Image: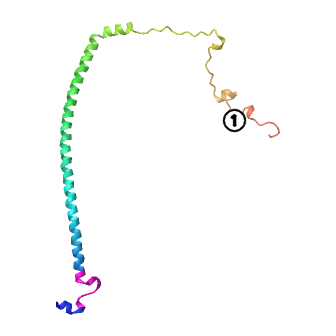
Amino acid sequence: MSIADLITGWRGTGSRRAIDEVRRLREEVFQLRGFLQQAGDELALLQWDLTVANSHLGKAELLVVHLDADIEDLTKERDALQEEVTSLRQRFAAQLAAEANAAAIRVPPVYRDTSDPDDQATEPIRVLTLAEAFGSTDPTHVPAWALKTGPAA
């Protein structure tokens, strides 16, 4: 038994009791240690993900180098083939033109038989402005059919 136990006024009451504060602080330390453990686990997972990502990055960089080399090779091959096609076209231009003329499809011009009365040629549609259609160029002119006549007028 301590002297604090003998003096009842020193024990405190409610939230001011030292033993309650110590208990609360121990629970908080326990909770913080749990958070620290979880943070360590998350950090380990993130480091593993970073290692995997770096591995994939290395593979991707290697693939890019190979693809770039393939592009350069294919570009050179394309340019060489383009030069070869151009020279062959120049060399065989006359022969290609002769073959095209020989294989051309010739169609005689079409003449429409209009002897049938139901199949007569039509004339173009005459398009008039409104002023021409109504026979007046005066903007205030009102056509006769638009005038109100009769009992309602």
| Quadrant position of residue 18 | bottom left
Q: Identify the residue at horizontal 69%, vertical 35% (top origin).
A: 140
Q: Identify the residue at horizontal 67%, vertical 27% (top origin).
A: 133
Percent x, y of residue 47: 19, 53
From the viewer's side, name the closer residue of 73 and 144.
Answer: 73
Q: Identify the residue at horizontal 21%, vertical 51% (top origin).
A: 49
User: In the image, is residue 119 part of the stretch drawn in magenta?
Assistant: no
**Direction from residue 75 to residue 97 in the image, left or right:** right
77 shown above or below 65: above
48 shown above or below 108: below
| Residue farthest to the bottom, as pictured | 7
Percent x, y of residue 27: 23, 73
Judged from the image, the secondary structure of the residue bearing numbered disc 1 is: loop
Percent x, y of residue 35: 23, 65
**Direction from residue 14 to residue 59 in the image, left or right:** left
User: In the image, is residue 15 part of the stretch drawn in magenta?
Assistant: yes
| Residue farthest to the front, as pictured | 1
Mark 1: few/some/many CA within 10 Å (<14, 14-19, 20+):
few
- The quadrant of the image that shows the N terminus is bottom left
Percent x, y of residue 10: 23, 90
Residue bearing the label numbered 1: 140
| Quadrant position of residue 153 | top right
Query: What span is in magenta?
Result: 9-20
123 shown above or below 46: above
| Residue farthest to the right, as pictured | 151
Q: Does the magenta stretch mainly form a helix, a strand or a loop?
A: helix
| Amino acid carrying mark 1 in the image | Thr
